[in-house]
Image (cartoon, rainbow, N blue to C red):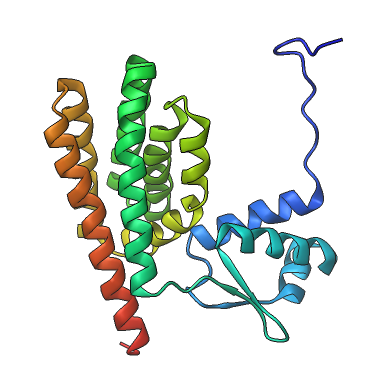
Amino acid sequence: MPATPGMQIEQPKTLTEIVVERIRASIIDGQFAFGENISEDKLATAFGVSRSPVRDALNALQFTGLVTIKPKRGSFVFNPTGEEVAEICDYRLMLEREALRLSMAADREGFLTALDDALDRMRERMQAGDEIGYVRIDTEFHNLFFDHCGNGLVQNAFHLVEARIATIRTALNARFKQRREDSFDQHVAIVEGLKRGDWEQVHDVLGKHITSIRTDAIDELSRSAAGE
């Protein structure tokens, strides 16, 4: 008998899946620095679990690019080079432009309503001085491009780099007030352009938005490497 829509029973998450979510959120929120060693023992103690689900979770996160596992040395938060940041940003720009076009064609009103709601919550978090809260909604804002696009392949392509993009975003926007304010203005301009159907403005602002992240991230990585 086929499953009836809306009546399927959601399967409970496994312990490993829960640990994956916890570690992923910790990395994205900046609780671990780029390149920082992630101790299996400390995580197991913090989560109140054995090392086995922690080890399985780290292996899963290695597949997403968030974690690098080095034999006999341990597990580390990804530490991108300038070239890797540039590649991620170029990939992101290509996907987000297409996702915007698809979302406006597939669900214009629902998409714009969701973007407006995200902007309102970003403004609230910015005025409250909640840096991490702001950045989390910033990530949600960009994820909406893919949530509404109606194309599973485009969504899957984005999921390959989603967590790394979010981590880089936190490293920049959570630390610098001016960076957040400039970023917010760019988000507003993107939505205004979409509402008017001004694709030249949308592409121009999105390009500047992602290019500035690319430049700032590479500069920050260079300063970190120089010990500044």
Residue at left offset 73%, top offset 86%:
72
Quarter holding the C terminus?
bottom left
Residue 87: percent from the left, percent from the top? 36, 62
Q: Is there any visible trace of residue 156 in the rendered image?
A: yes
Residue 105: percent from the left, percent from the top? 33, 19
User: Residue 118 lies in what quarter of the image?
Assistant: top left
Q: Is residue 167 above or below residue 142?
A: below
Q: Is residue 113 above or below residue 25?
A: above
Residue 99: percent from the left, percent from the top? 36, 34
On screen, residue 31 versus residue 50, left or right, reads left
Residue 11: percent from the left, percent from the top? 80, 32
Residue at left offset 37%, top offset 51%:
130
On screen, residue 39 versus residue 99, left or right, reads right
Residue at left offset 77%, top offset 68%:
44
On screen, residue 103 versus residue 186, left or right, reads right
Q: Nearer the viewer, residue 23 or 146?
A: 146
User: Residue 102 lies in what quarter of the image?
Assistant: top left
Q: Nearer the viewer, residue 61 or 153?
A: 153
Quarter holding the N terminus?
top right
User: Residue 89 lies in what quarter of the image?
Assistant: bottom left
Q: Nearer the viewer, residue 224 or 103?
A: 103
Q: Is there any visible trace of residue 49 in the rendered image?
A: no
Count of numbered marks: 0
Residue positioned most to the bottom: 227
Residue at left offset 51%, top offset 35%:
153
